[in-house]
Amino acid sequence: MEIDFNNIEDLYIRVLPSLRLKQRLLMKQGHSIGISNIWDYLTKEKWSKAKDLTLYDIVNDIMTLDAIEVINYYKEV
């Protein structure tokens, strides 16, 4: 089954539960990283050159994201 998204906002709404869960997990680890920070890092850094990402790939990237990746990204920006 293929899932298509009309725009980035549709995708964001679809993966928002995963983003919220990841934020809570990061908070339990002592990191104060917002959902928008996670989303911005993934869309502007990790997925910027990716092609043909599946919903599985996107959710997997969210759930396996390391807080240090996001922190380092914002140190460089």
Image: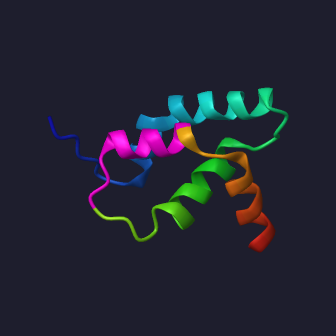
Quarter of the image with the C terminus is bottom right
Asked whether 60 falls inside the magenta stretch, the response is yes
For this orientation, the residue located farthest to the left is: 1
Residue 54: x and y in percent read 30, 47
Count of labels in the image? 0
Q: Is residue 5 left or right of residue 42?
A: left
Q: Is residue 50 left or right of residue 63?
A: left
Is 5 placed above or below 40 here? above
Classify residue 1 by image quadrant. Answer: top left
Asked whether 29 falls inside the magenta stretch, the response is no
Q: Report the predominant secondary structure element of the magenta stretch.
A: helix
**Which residue range is magenta in the image?**
52-63
Q: Give the residue at x 82% y 40%.
A: 32
Q: Is residue 2 left or right of residue 18?
A: left
Q: Give the residue at x 35% y 54%.
A: 7
Residue 22: x and y in percent read 62, 33
